[in-house]
Amino acid sequence: MIVDDLHEVQENVLNACKRANRNPDEVTLIAVSKTKPVSMLEEVYADGVRDFGENKVQELCDKYEVLPKDIRWHMIGHLQRNKVKYLIGKTCLIHSVDSVRLAETIEHEAAKKDTIMSILIEVNVAQEDSKFGLHVEEVMEMVETISKMPHIRIEGLMTIAPFVDDAEENRTIFRQLKQLSVDIGSKNMNNVNMNVLSMGMSGDYQVAIEEGATLVRVGTSIFGRRNYQV
Ligand SMILES: *Cc1c(COP(=O)(O)O)cnc(C)c1O
């Protein structure tokens, strides 16, 4: 059943690409597996999924240990600086960088491991108080600062759009993030790519793709609702 739901999401991704005249190769579906047991991840892995998203360092590391090593683990949740050291080498992309201090810690830990860490800058486009992420006006300066850190590569931007009943309500949010990435990309800064746009979740990933998402983070529509009591 999980695989049926997965296929439905994949079909929706393809259709959104078609509507937007986009090459489906440009869009990667991340299966957001937080709180879900390893057995469920194995089901979608067996069906070909290789990109998984987790929002807690401990859970990501535990799953990393027991699942195949060709999985690309995406860290999508708010990240505490004291946990960064456990992540380097295990995650392919940290989506949630929203401060210079966090970036400094990533720089320090990546340097220790002699590696370069790919990150996205998290932008709170809708300026919701309940959410992490920079306001749009703050992003350019932070990108400039972080771009000087040799063990970090900025690959693009991420946003978590508001929960809405109608995904259309988030279209302008996605459009704004895309525009910001174009503006930053046009500065041609060293160490900065704006190739990745991580936006869109179960409720709105199709609209996000129409507006330029390259990574969509889908949990509930694949794995079902999460039970936070367990
Ligand atoms: C949980 C989570 C998702 C997935 O949300 P669904 O609505 O279950 O698809 C996406 N992005 C982030 C940052 C999350 O924490």
Image (spheres, rainbow, N blue to C red):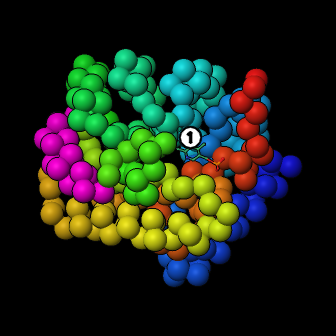
In the rendered view, does 193 fall on the left or right side of 223? left
The residue at the point 70 percent across, 60 percent down is 9
Q: Amino acid at mark 1?
A: Gly
Residue 132: in sight, yes or no?
A: yes
**Residue sitting nearer the eye, 99 or 59:** 99
Image quarter of the C terminus: top right
Q: Position of residue 118 (x, y in %)?
A: 33, 41
Is 208 covered by the magenta stretch?
Answer: no
Q: Residue furthest right?
A: 1
Q: Around disc 1, counting alpha carbons within 10 Å, would you say few (fewer than 14), some (14 to 19), or many (20 or more)?
A: many
Q: State whether the magenta stretch is mostly helix, strand or loop.
A: helix
Classify mark 1: helix, strand or loop: strand
The residue at the point 33 percent across, 40 percent down is 98
Q: Disc 1 designates what residue?
A: 53
Per the rendered image, the range of residues in magenta is: 136-151
Q: Is mark 1 within 8 Å of ligand 1?
A: yes
